Structure formats: C-alpha cells, structure tokens
Image (cartoon, rainbow, N blue to C red):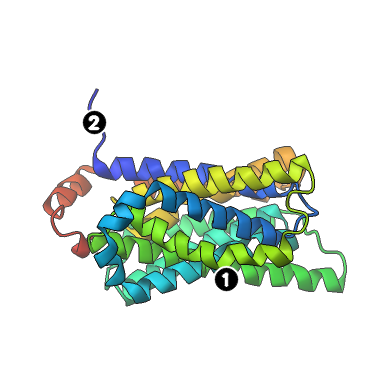
Amino acid sequence: MRRLEPYSRGVIAIIAASVIWGTTGTAASFAPEVSALAIGAFAMGVGGVLLVINALGELLRDKALLLGHRRSLLLGGLSVAIYPLAFYSSMRLSGVAIGTVISIASAPLFTVMLECLISRRRISMRWGLSFVLGAAGIVLLALGQRPVATTVTSSLLSYLGVGLGLVAGLSYAAYSWVARHMIEQGVDSKSAMASLFGIAAMLLLPTLAVTGHNLFATATHTSVALYMACIPMFVGYLCFSYGLRYIAASTATLITLLEPVVAVLLAVLIVGEWLSAAGWMGIPLIMLSLLLQTMRLPADRRGAAIKASSTSAEEL
C-alpha cells in the first residue's frame, strides 16, 4: 500500500481533530447545571496536563528553543486559556449550534490575517474561494437555527454569546498561528502544543475553586468532564498538532469548518435543536469548501516538492 504524502497525512489529522471537537457542544449539553466556565477550564486544563506528560521528552529537548520564543509562547498560552471560557460561554448563551458556528467560522479569517500581516504569506485564490464557500455555508447554518431568544433580555444575551464566539475564534486563530510558527522554527509539534496548553492549564485550573463546585456532583457531570478532557482536548489536540507539521495554520483552521457541521448534526439528532432547510443547504457548501481546499492537484504536488526545503515561502 502506497504511503500517504505528508500533506495528506496533515489533512487527515486535522479532519480527525475536527470530528472529535464537533462532539464537545453536545457533550457539554448533558451537564447544563455545570458552569460553562468550569467545563472549559477543566477540559483545557486537564487536557493540557495530559499533553505535557505525553510530551515530556520533547519538551526537555526543545527547552532552549521554547525559551527563545517566550513572547509567542505567552501569547499562545494566554489564547488557549481564553478560548474555552469564551467558546463554552458562547454556546451556553447562543445555543450549541450557533456558538460553535460563530467560534469556528471566524477562526480561519483571523488566522489568515495573522499570517498575512506577520508571516507575510500570500492568500491564494483557491483559499479565498474555499473560505467564501465555507462562510456562506456557515451563514446558512446560523440562519437555519431557530432563535432561542424570545425577550429583549434573552436577545441581548444571545448577541453577547455571538460576541464571545468571535473572541473564541480570535484566540483559536492566535494559538494555532503560534503553534505553527514555533514548529516552523524547529520546535517539535508535540512540545509546541504541550507548552501552550501547559501555560493555559496553570491559568485555568485554579479557577475551578470558584466555578467547579458541582463539576463532580453526579456521575453524568463527572463523565462529561472526563470525556471533554481526555478525548476532545487531549486526543483532538494531538491530532491537530500533528497536522500542523505539514500544513499552514490558515489551511488547518479552514479545514476545521467541518467541526460546526458535526456539532450541528449532533445538536439536531441528539440535543433536539431545530434546523431549517436553509441550514441543511449550508452543509454541502461547507463540504465543497473543504474539498476544494484539501484537494491536491498535480501542480500542487510539484510545487510542494520544490518548496519542501523552504516552508516559510509556502503560499496559503
């Protein structure tokens, strides 16, 4: 059996991460009495500890390189800490589907802005077309979700949830860019992700003293908390860090538009959220966007071979 080329392995790893992450909103909905801040802090915090333990050897080997990127490391770690607090609060205020859609859909745009402004990479026409198709699909998904707000107060909370979703998207873009940047500078992908999540864990876990009073009150709460930490955060981010070895952060975050598709389908089938015909029309647009972005044409393969030794010149 022919071995997959590095780009294809990276794409498959990001797709796997996206599918796993798509289950988080539905999982969190089984513990509505638990604070969204507590779920996010526990999942990212414990997931970060597991990532650090798994990458101890790589962290020790890359110690000097990591210290050489202290500012980036601090920015990335802070972004990881902000992300779950904003993401789960957004889902709680705006609904599982809308919260996930806004958070994940905004991340590719924020990421490509970082890569253009800081890394000086160019935006290819194919990436732009993929993003337009994906964004259109996301808009249809959002429009297809029945509004949960029926009063002025709940409407304001729903808008606040959308705002927090944008904060989540920006923080997601920031730590994805930092991780990819460190990998390009020679840091191992496992130690890059583990270092960011290790810093976040130190910031997040102490907050459980205030928010986590009922995190383990029932077997259901405990199961949700452990699932979120071990599967989406630990396994999901192992896949994501592996994928970042081979593809740009903007490409990776664009592929993760698959996550809201999974989240919406699970929200409809399991949680009982409603989706209109317009929402269902958005799903094939997102899938077309992913197909366009991940498809490797012969010219792409030749270009990748030529640029293999100089990834800093890679076009998005």
Q: Image check: 309 left or right of 58?
A: left
Q: Image check: 36 left or right of 118?
A: right
Q: Identify the element where label 2 is drawn.
A: loop
Q: Residue at x 30, y 65 (%)?
A: 181
Q: Pointer 2: residues within 10 angstroms few (<14), some, or many (20+)?
A: few
Q: Residue at x 36, y 72 (%)?
A: 72
Residue 173: x and y in percent read 45, 65
Q: Image check: 75 left or right of 164?
A: left
In the displayed image of the protein, which residue is found farthest to the top?
A: 1
Quarter of the figure with the C terminus: bottom left
Q: Is residue 257 above or below residue 15?
A: below
- Numbered tag placed on residue 167 in the rendering: 1
Q: Residue at x 32, y 56 (%)?
A: 59
Residue type at mark 2 is Arg
User: Toward which corner of the image does residue 36 lie, by quadrant?
Assistant: bottom right
User: Toward which corner of the image does residue 155 lie, by quadrant?
Assistant: bottom right
Q: Nearer the viewer, residue 266 or 65?
A: 65
Residue type at mark 1 is Val
Q: Is residue 124 visible?
A: no
- Numbered tag placed on residue 185 in the rendering: none
Q: Pointer 1: residues within 10 angstroms few (<14), some, or many (20+)?
A: many
Q: Is residue 112 visible?
A: yes
Spatial separation of the CA atoms under disc 2 and disc 1: 39 Å
Q: Nearer the viewer, residue 44 or 137?
A: 44
Residue 81: x and y in percent read 54, 66
Q: Is residue 111 above or below residue 190?
A: below
Mark 2 lies on residue:
3
Residue 289: x and y in percent read 44, 50
Q: Earlier in the sequence, mark 2 or mark 1?
A: 2
Residue 250: x and y in percent read 38, 60
Q: Residue at x 28, y 45 (%)?
A: 7
Quarter of the figure with the N terminus: top left
